[in-house]
Image (spheres, rainbow, N blue to C red):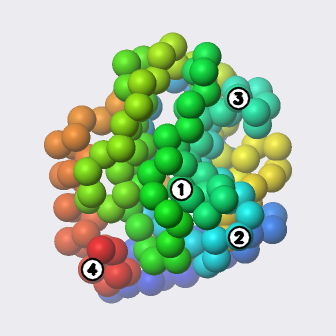
Amino acid sequence: PSHDKASQWGADVVNFDGSDDYISTNLTSALSEFSFLLVSKNTNLTGAQAEITKDNADAVRESAFILAGGNYAFRVWNPSFNPLFVAAGTTNRKFIACRASSSVFKARLNNNSDTSGTAGALTTGSDAIWIGAQSNNSAFFNGEMSFASVFNTALSDSNTSSIYSLIKTTIGQELGLP
């Protein structure tokens, strides 16, 4: 991916071209609960675009925030593999918070109310966390990402709101975060 400075606050923007850009982290621990937080902007809404994934040895069994069929979905690997649809896709900049534990999984778009579902037995494997693609080199993200963070715990609602407020008052206003 390419890299730009986007604000006076030093907000870095990483540009993904939708064809072969991704970042593979060395975060390979299995997670019994987790949170993904992102600030991103899709260039277009075509095809499947994975913004962040934690894989279980293949791209079929993964936990991911992905654009599919024009909708954003947070899906977690559990025995029933239920996707949680968050909202219709948008080309506006957005804040995403995805949180999962053995009891519940939640997704929040911007600072709206959480959408939640029942997680069941949550499992992630020891594969790396990928930003901008699935780990089988597919579903490449097409757009900009200015913030990505992974936690090894399911953040509380108040933690998520606090992080959103902090981002909005620093880099978010200049980047156009709602």
Instruction: Identify residue type, mark 2.
Output: Thr
> On the image, numbered disc 4 is attached to which residue?
173
Q: Earlier in the sequence, mark 1 or mark 4?
A: 1
Instruction: Identify residue type, mark 1.
Output: Tyr
Q: Secondary structure at mark 1?
A: strand
Q: Decide: few, some or many residues near mark 3? Use Cα within 10 Å; few <14, some 14-19, many ≥20.
A: some
Q: For this view, does 95 lie left or right of residue 72?
A: left
The answer to whether one can see residue 84 in this image is yes
Q: Decide: few, some or many residues near mark 4? Use Cα within 10 Å; few <14, some 14-19, many ≥20.
A: few
Which residue: 56% across, 31% down?
82
Query: Between marks 3 and 4, how big is the CA–CA gap?
Result: 36 Å
Query: Between marks 1 and 2, how big is the CA–CA gap?
Result: 12 Å
Q: Secondary structure at mark 3?
A: loop
Q: Can you give x and y, in whole percent of width and height, for residue 10 in the image?
A: 37, 77
Nearer the observer, 152 or 76:
76
Q: Secondary structure at mark 4?
A: helix
> On the image, numbered disc 1 is attached to which residue?
72
Instruction: Place residue 98 in its image quadrant.
Output: top left
Q: Decide: few, some or many residues near mark 1? Use Cα within 10 Å; few <14, some 14-19, many ≥20.
A: many
Nearer the observer, 54 or 63:
63
Q: Earlier in the sequence, mark 3 or mark 2?
A: 2
Which residue: 38% across, 26% down?
104
Q: Earlier in the sequence, mark 3 or mark 4?
A: 3
Mark 2 or mark 4, whichever is nearer to me:
2
Query: Between marks 3 and 2, how big is the CA–CA gap?
Result: 23 Å
Q: Is residue 32 above or below residue 95?
A: above
Q: Earlier in the sequence, mark 2 or mark 4?
A: 2
Instruction: Place residue 77 in its image quadrant.
Output: top right
Mark 3 or mark 4, whichever is nearer to me:
3
> On the image, numbered disc 3 is attached to which residue?
61
Instruction: Place residue 18 in its image quadrant.
Output: bottom right
Q: Can you give x and y, in whole percent of width and height, for residue 90 in the image?
A: 50, 72
